[in-house]
Amino acid sequence: MVVILVTWLLWKHRNGCVLDETNPDMRTLLRFYDIERHLWCLAGANSMASLGQG
């Protein structure tokens, strides 16, 4: 599940950089990881909860 989440976030971040001309930013990417991981847990991906916050 982590691989899917990280791949999804990298794809979205890359699209933001290319299409919206934003700058690559690791802090933003990690913040989005925490938010998305939390949302996935709420949606039922309970195995993600054991990963803790980044």
Image: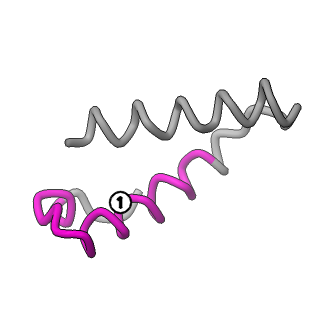
Q: Does dot 1 land on a helix, a strand or a loop?
A: helix
Along the line of sight, which residue is nearer the eye, 36 or 50? 36
Q: Which residues are magenta?
A: 29-50
- Above or below, comparing residue 1 to residue 42 in the picture: above
| Residue 43 location, quadrant | bottom left
Along the line of sight, which residue is nearer the eye, 32 or 27? 32
Pinpoint residue 38: horizontal percent, then vertical percent.
35, 69
**Residue at point 37% right, 68% down?**
39
Pinpoint residue 49: horizontal percent, then vertical percent.
20, 66
Magenta region, mostly helix, strand or loop? helix
| Residue 3 location, quadrant | top left
- Above or below, comparing residue 24 to residue 51 in the picture: above
Pinpoint residue 12: horizontal percent, then vertical percent.
58, 37
**Mark 1 surroundings within 10 Å by alpha-carbon count, few (fewer than 14), some (14 through 19), many (20 or more):** many
Q: Is residue 39 magenta?
A: yes
**Which image quadrant: the N terminus?**
top left
The residue that disc 1 covers is 37
| Residue 41 location, quadrant | bottom left
**Which image quadrant: the C terminus?**
bottom left
